[in-house]
Image (spheres, grey):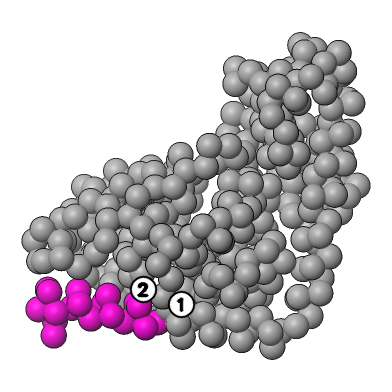
Amino acid sequence: MSKKPRVFSGIQPTGDIHLGNYLGAVKNWVDSQDEYENIFCIVNSHAITTRQDPENLRKKTFELAALLLACGIDTKKSHLFIQSEIDEHSALAWILDCNIPMGELSRMTQFKDKSAKNPKNINVGLFNYPALMAADILLYQPDFVPVGEDQKQHLELTRNVAQRFNRDYGECFKIPNPLIPKVGARIMGLDTPQVKMSKSNKAPNHAVFLLDKPEIITNKFKKATTDSLSSIVFDPARAGLYNLLCIYEIFSKKSREQIENEFEGKGYGYFKMCLSELVIESLRPISNQYNEIIKERGFIQKVLADSAAHMRVIAKETYHKAKILVGLV
């Protein structure tokens, strides 16, 4: 294995990848492939905490793999596999379940939020979700886990359970640190810039998706929420404009001073037009690549199988060590 710092990242195959996912996670994954040894996992087991159509879940899992490859995940530098293909994820989660107090899991913000949204489907899997997430991470002994600000709680639980396990049973897990990008870690909804852009929000102008057609992207940005002021400056208090400027900043790679100078004296309409054009041109290669890769089913299956075989060796080693330490072997 590589001597570069190891990074583990997971993404669910439900919904479509939007700018928030891309700028907050996937783009950073792609850009860091020379710096880190990256492990990318499509966490399809997490998806079934809410009821899924089985055929659609298989389809979305396959499409997500194709889209991640289209975004630039290079399998010569990184690993890309499906969570459910490696049984040690759920097996280690059970060991961790038996070492996490109920109170710790009940305090998880995501459990509270999802329970409130789906009161008729508060299942055990939803409650235990953080234990499986911890298992996903700890199996591969990563140095870092890229997380958004709102996901730090789950990583803290992972760190806590790993430290407690190492203390009580003996050294087993590396304690991973958070990796939080300075820009783009939290892209907000275009229509509601007070909330994070979300796959589950079905409002038509909430999110720009990576495979949206150019005219749809233009229309969504045109309708994006701003304010009644006129100056185009980076001001976090002006949530709508600030969100759009952050998107422009990441895609353009210009400094904030350059961007403010570029749009000084210009109106929101002009800025939104420029932003739309920039995003369309930036996403075009991804869309084109996806349309080619999705046709190559055999290639995608081989990529996923090869990575799973490679990662299974590490997962088995970690799980076997944990089994020995708790007395299951």
| Other-residue count near label 2 (Cα within 10 Å), few / some / many at <14 / 14–19 / ≥20 | many
**What residue is shown at x 26% (from left), y 77% (from top)?**
319
Q: CA distance from mark 1 to mark 2?
A: 8 Å
Magenta stretch: dominant SS? helix
Q: Is residue 171 visible?
A: yes
Segment tinted magenta in the rendering: 312-329
The spot of residue 64 in percent (x, y) is 64, 67
Residue visible at 46% across and 51% down in the picture: 146
Which circle marks residue 284 in the picture? none
The reply, left or right, for residue 4 in relation to residue 299 is: left
- Residue 326 sits in which quadrant? bottom left
**Which structural element holds mark 2?**
helix
The verdict on residue 75 being magenta is no
Q: Earlier in the sequence, mark 1 or mark 2?
A: 1
Q: Is residue 325 magenta?
A: yes
Q: What residue is drawn where x is 14% and y is 79%? A: 324
Q: Which residue has dot 2 on it? A: 89
**Location of residue 215 in the rendering, given as x and y in whole percent from the top left corner:** 91, 47
**Tag 2: residue type?**
His
Residue at which label 1 appears:
84
Residue toward you, 190 or 169: 169
Callout 1–callout 2 Cβ contact below 8 Å: yes
